[in-house]
Amino acid sequence: MAIMSLEETVLDRISPDPKHRRFVNGVVSDLVQKVEGDIRERGLDLEVRLVGSVAKDTYLRNPDVDLFIMFPTATSRKDLENVGLAIGRSVLGGEERYAEHPYIHGEFGGLEVDLVPCYRIASPLGLMSAVDRTPFHTEYVKNHVSEKQKAEIRLLKQFTKGIGVYGAEAKTQGFSGYLIELLILRYGDFRTVLKEASRWRYGQTLHLAEHSKDKIDSPLIFYDPVDPKRNVSSALSLDSFSLFVHACGEYLKKEDIRFFFPKAGKALDMRTIKNELRSRGTKVIVVEFRRPKIIDDDLYPQIRKTLEGLKALLEANDFVVIDKTFLVGDKVRFVLELQSDVLPKCRRHQGPPVWIDNAEEFLAKWKGKGIRRPFIDKGRWIVIAERECTRATDMIRGQVGSMALGSDFRGKKGFRVIEHEVVLTRGYKETLTGLLEKRKPWER
Amino acid sequence: MAIMSLEETVLDRISPDPKHRRFVNGVVSDLVQKVEGDIRERGLDLEVRLVGSVAKDTYLRNPDVDLFIMFPTATSRKDLENVGLAIGRSVLGGEERYAEHPYIHGEFGGLEVDLVPCYRIASPLGLMSAVDRTPFHTEYVKNHVSEKQKAEIRLLKQFTKGIGVYGAEAKTQGFSGYLIELLILRYGDFRTVLKEASRWRYGQTLHLAEHSKDKIDSPLIFYDPVDPKRNVSSALSLDSFSLFVHACGEYLKKEDIRFFFPKAGKALDMRTIKNELRSRGTKVIVVEFRRPKIIDDDLYPQIRKTLEGLKALLEANDFVVIDKTFLVGDKVRFVLELQSDVLPKCRRHQGPPVWIDNAEEFLAKWKGKGIRRPFIDKGRWIVIAERECTRATDMIRGQVGSMALGSDFRGKKGFRVIEHEVVLTRGYKETLTGLLEKRKPWER
């Protein structure tokens, strides 16, 4: 028996075998029949189109099935939504899920299914709804990918999954399946993608066809071969891009199964956490909200905005933020590690240059207010002013009303600010692990 | 008896009365005779020229007498120095004083005298030594100033003296007598100078004659009427400029004798200082050197450089400097008020972007060293690193050898760093008053 390479071993684990293939094909065929039957019963004549990884045969085991119901372009948006969702509900039960475009997500025959209404447009340039391009993406890949490359795509998908950057949704801000397929088409195979990507820099630009010359500011720009103005990797965050670039280099230096199948992260024990924070000398505060009842694609952008808002508020008040993270559960927890959570009562406040007209106003405003009088330093007025809040936690409590928060955090549902000492003594082990554990997925 | 205006009262106090005039003229005439006699005895034929405020009749009571000994341009620099200083020593005793140009300073007949050798050049553009322009300045003012304006000059001199910005020497970085004379020539009288100056902005440019078009970056640019490329106010610091602009406005709003004759500053009492610092919550540390044995014109630039160097060192190590000052006595004391004089053991250290070639080096350098592993934030590598020094005082003690200090502070003569607690308990009352007292001279 020949010894399998690491990548062969991985492929063996992730590729659908004949049995699994039969299972998926069976489910899809049943599903299509059922949807077509439902359409006929409504007296309608709509094409049902299998798209996505199952259609392209680039799926990993237990794939999501993406089934599109294609409406004539003359259909009103309202009819498309109503009829589309009605068919979905009748076939899947399931739940309506959408940030921008309506669809039904449910379970069918043991697989997760997305049933999505779209317009049957003549060209991807004539987009009428956000998802109308998808059938063209499916066609493009089907027409260009070789049998051998399907395995390369599966490897790259599992690699991005393993390192935590698979999926373009807001939670991950990583690589979409389509982007991964295009990378294999562009570079030929898994290893070449890794070799090239390990040398990418911010702004790396790729294409497979003629494309627009408009400048796009993004970590990675891959012009969509079916829509020359669109960047396929527009959802990829700077951190996902960076982690991928780094991981590619690391894997090439020393390949390891953990890049594909990382071990589950374990919480640090509380003793380790306490010792480490004591020796760091920093203070960790936690800002907690009840989790808003919205879908992930709406939630995560708001979480990131709120975390940045908290950091900006702290820094504007002279607190030094050493590190930060968030954790989503029943509650959304924002974790901020500070150089110090208390500042002295006074601060240096810089006013205008002495020779500017509003210097008078500045002096009038501070008359009798600062600690001692304003003085001149390097041509500007300076006051030593009293701080209203010397504790970071009090400051956040006082300012949460006027902060730049995600809209669903503005209502302050379940809002609490937790002091360092309390964070250390109550059950915040996972929260603190999320902050302190810096091993990459493949290093665990 | 008519009631005198404030400015008449001031003039009455500062202008030489006939008796004082006779005294000054007598001293000058004796001095010139003695110098001319000394020159004759050496078998030389050199012109002796009275310059400066006594020559221009713009002096205040008890003026310095500036007497120049004018050498032919064929004289070697060495002869000029040797002969010039020899005459000075023989007439005045006195001491050699120079940063750049040699001269003898001494006392004669009850007045301070500077006896200065220079070249008798044909035009100020043919400058051979730094002071050759002075006789031309004296001539220019004598030829342009009216009798009435001499009083206006005296008022403006006393005003700048009162607010602490009179004199172009390194200690003060203020307005030279010549600059004050030119300001009166430019604007006509004392009140108009104040009115205009209260509206000056950084870069205010003035002239009395044709001048160079070269850009000069300076708070105030006054082109020298006898040398069109030279800025007469090049020694004026941003802070002296700013204080003058502010004081002009304040005086015009509410004239007060204290602008001309400020009360002596009193030290704050130690109880006030302690209470104030306690309520501020800041920490004051003092860095002390024995005073280097050099003249003020060399000392003060080095002091300012050293103070900036201390601030930069502290800030580079994450200490927040709230305020700073220095005090010169037997010792030179640098006083730094810090938000905190202790920092936690760890700090956030930002590395290169992940995609830059030297990211590898960065990771190699920090391998096993930081607290936990490097992580990616906004595309850059970050480590939480251990601080070598958590106390500001220890840090300064450790770094003083490698700091950007003035050259005469580098030897570390009498170098000491004094902790906050010690500063508060030992005799640092004057030092702390220098830091905390923010009243302007006229507000005392």
Image: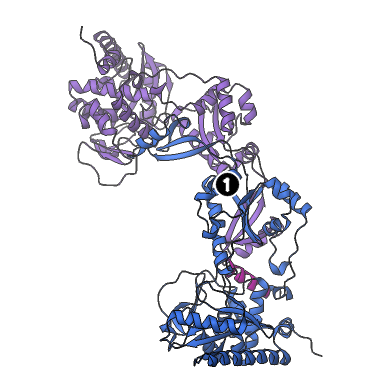
Chain colours: A blue, B purple
Q: Quadrant of the N terminus of chain B?
A: top left
Closest to the observer: A45 or B22?
A45
Query: Residue B351 in the image: x percent, y percent?
Result: 59, 58
Question: Where B235 sits versus A305, above or below?
Answer: above
Tag 1 secondary structure: helix
Left of B75 or right of it: where is B411? right
Closest to the observer: A405 or A200?
A405
Q: Which residues are magenta?
A: A239-251
Query: Residue B363 in the image: x percent, y percent?
Result: 65, 62
Q: Magenta span has A440? A: no
Question: Where B249 sits versus A251, above or below?
Answer: above
Q: Which residue is mark 1?
A: A397
Q: Residue at x 50, y 92 (%)?
A: A43
Amino acid type at mark 1 = Arg
Query: Residue A85 in the image: x percent, y percent?
Result: 54, 80
Name the subunit of mark 1. A
Whether residue B306 is visible, yes or no, is no
Whether residue B2 is visible, yes or no, is yes
The image quadrant of residue A374 is: top left
The image quadrant of residue A261 is: bottom right
